[in-house]
Image (cartoon, grey):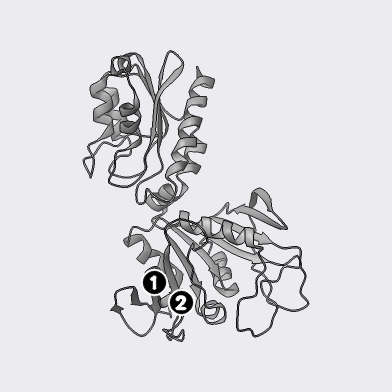
Amino acid sequence: MIEQDENYIRRCIQIAKNGLGTTYPNPLVGSVIVYKNQIIGEGWHKRAGQAHAEINAIDSVKDKTLLKESDIYVSLEPCSHYGKTPPCAVKIAELQFKRVIIGSIDPNSKVNGKGISIIKNSGIPIVTGILENECYNLNKRFFTFHIKKRPYIFLKWAETLNKKIDNGEDRDSPFWISNPYSLQKTHLIRSQEESILVGKNTAVTDNPALTCRSIHGSNPLRILIDRRLDVPESFRLYNSEAPTLIFNEKKNLKKEFTEYIRIDFSENIYTQILNNLYLRNIQSLIVEGGRQTLQNFIDNSLWDEAIITTSNTIVKNGTDSPTLFGNITHQEYINTNLITYIQNLSGQ
């Protein structure tokens, strides 16, 4: 039975990933309904404000008379509160499924065991903790946001084979280390996360747009650290392709696509920025540079995952890439580039 339960929760995780980048601020959730060891319905949460995974799975079952003799699997504890949609736990209790099998508990204070209590009190047998670690990883952004009270932080950069992030020259256009296929992967990652941050030097040197322009997807919220407002307003970070937050020491001002936020640069600016993003309900952040900005996040242990693209090129001069230590979770080649994924084992 345990192996069978794991297989169906694994399917829940698989289909839940279809919602990556579109469910914020809600978690990724998948659900399957099984009758006599056959899947008769499945669904995932597609967008905040729309039906949750359990309801989509229930609605997909053609013969509703089978529900009372079926097991329902869900990767995350069913919700128990009224929001934009009714609570899934109440619906499950009303339908009197044969069993309810859950991957992980919801850390959101509005749920956090309450959904399980509703189902248990209805008399339905319930199993929890199936593939719990995998379900946690599925919703690493959601869990980090609710437990650590900050966004899940990705550090991302490209480096040469001899660990340089640029060629050490003044330039009028960006120095590309990634190949075109890796750049497309970068834009895919941007489309899946809520916000992206660079420092002033990177903005001035590269004039980045920080969009996902080479694929179909939503652009992330752009964040610029610019203490003295040195980045010209003619630069692409100020255009209308996506909203931009500018953390500075001079002014608070809100425009149509740009918001200036004054912070205290004599204190830890990174915790101030993360606190501001938490209050805005932002669950994920990509930090793309420059070198000092990345290293400051590392030195403050304010990162969860690093994504490093390494080319097969070597430059004589240039800026050294950031230094970090963590656990390599996996690697992949995209044409001539090696992408390494590193997990922080001691994040705050």
Location of residue 177 by image quarter: bottom right
- From the top left corner, tell me how far across and down residue 306 is, in percent: 59, 58
- Viewer-proximal residue among 182 and 309: 182
Q: Quadrant of residue 160?
A: bottom right
113 versus 2 height, above or below: below
Visible residue check, residue 268: no
What residue lies at 34% left-to-right and 23% top-to-bottom? 61
On the image, the x and y values in percent for residue 143 come to: 42, 47
Residue 93 lies, with reference to residue 345, above or below; the image says above
Question: Which secondary structure lies at badge 1?
Answer: strand
Dot 2 falls on a residue whose secondary structure is: helix
Query: Please, is residue 296 above or below residue 186 in the view?
Result: below
Q: Which residue: 64% across, 65% down?
A: 158
Q: Residue at x 57, y 59 (%)?
A: 184
Which residue corresponds to mark 2? 236
Pick the front one: 294 or 46: 46
Q: How many marks on residues?
A: 2
Q: Nearer the viewer, mark 1 or mark 2?
A: 2
Check whether the beta carbons of the residues at disc 1 and disc 2 lie within 8 A of each other: no
Horizontal arrangement in the rendering, residue 91 relative to residue 130 (left or right): left
Q: Is residue 84 visible?
A: yes
Q: Amino acid at mark 2?
A: Arg
Dot 1: few (<14), some (14–19), or many (≥20) neighbours within 10 Å? Answer: many
Residue annotated with mark 1: 244
Question: Mark 1: which amino acid?
Answer: Thr
In terms of depth relative to the viewer, which is nearer, 15 or 224?
15
